[in-house]
Amino acid sequence: MDNAPILVVHMIEQLVTLGPYGMLIAAFLAGSFMPFSSEAVMLALMALGVNPWELIIWGTIGNVLGSGFNYCVGMLGKEEWFEKYLHVKPKDMDRARRFMKGRGAYMGFFAFVPLLGSAITILLGLMRANPVITFASITVGKVVRYIVLIYGAFFVSWLTKIIMA
């Protein structure tokens, strides 16, 4: 377990060498129930000069595919499997269920929320939520998330330059 941070850093380095396709893979992992964050890959690729809109597009595609994976797992599974095999805690599932109550597929918009997002997408699959509305709302949420992250990074960079000047 002591090597876990080293492995994560190595994985991020490898994903960065793949350029925008690395962003796609990182976003897929982050969008699924796997514990991964695509932000480090995105920031490294931004620093290397990759077009921000390319990162938004590939990040969104990967993140939506990751959420789609969760949705399919939810469709195939039983709730008790999620804790046993996917390590999604019943507490997170209950919190997601309360959050989604009466809103259904439109709650896919919030799939970008850390920790809760995976539970939301798994529950949407388990509940057999309308796939068209579900994936439309997931996609909108993911696009907004990456646009905010990219422009937030630009703002921080600009502010740092002003402060250091």
Image (spheres, rainbow, N blue to C red):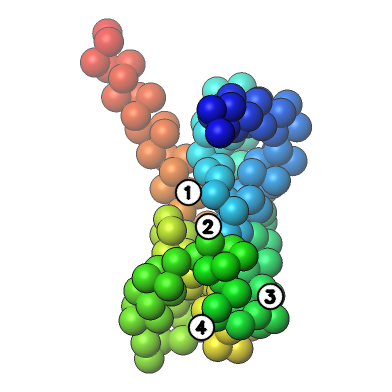
Question: On the image, numbered disc 2 is attached to which residue?
Answer: 143
Q: Residues within 10 Å of mark 2 (few under 14, many from 20)?
A: many
In primary-sequence order, the first of circles 3 and 4 is: 3
Rendering coords of residue 160 (x, y %): 31, 20
Contact (Cβ within 8 Å) of mark 2 with mark 1: yes
> Dot 1 surroundings within 10 Å: few (below 14), some, or many (20 or more)?
some
Sequence-first disc among 2 and 3: 3
| Residue bearing mark 1 | 147
Q: Earlier in the sequence, mark 3 or mark 1?
A: 3
Q: Nearer the viewer, mark 3 or mark 4?
A: 3
Q: Residue furthest left?
A: 163
Q: Type of residue at label 2?
A: Val
* Label annotation for residue 117: none
Residue visible at 66% across and 73% down?
Answer: 73
Q: Secondary structure at mark 2?
A: helix
x and y percentages locating residue 102 in the rendered image: 38, 91
Mark in the foreground, 1 or 4:
4
Determine the CA span between mark 3 and mark 1: 26 Å
Q: How many marks?
A: 4
Residue assigned mark 3: 72
Q: Decide which of tag 1 and tag 4 comes sooner along the chain.
A: 4
Contact check, label 2 and label 3, Cβ < 8 Å: no
Q: Residues within 10 Å of mark 4 (few under 14, many from 20)?
A: many
Q: Secondary structure at mark 1?
A: helix
In the picture of the structure, the residue carrying the numbered disc 4 is: 105
Q: Nearer the viewer, mark 2 or mark 4?
A: 4
Spatial separation of the CA atoms under disc 3 and disc 4:
14 Å
Q: Amino acid at mark 4?
A: Ala
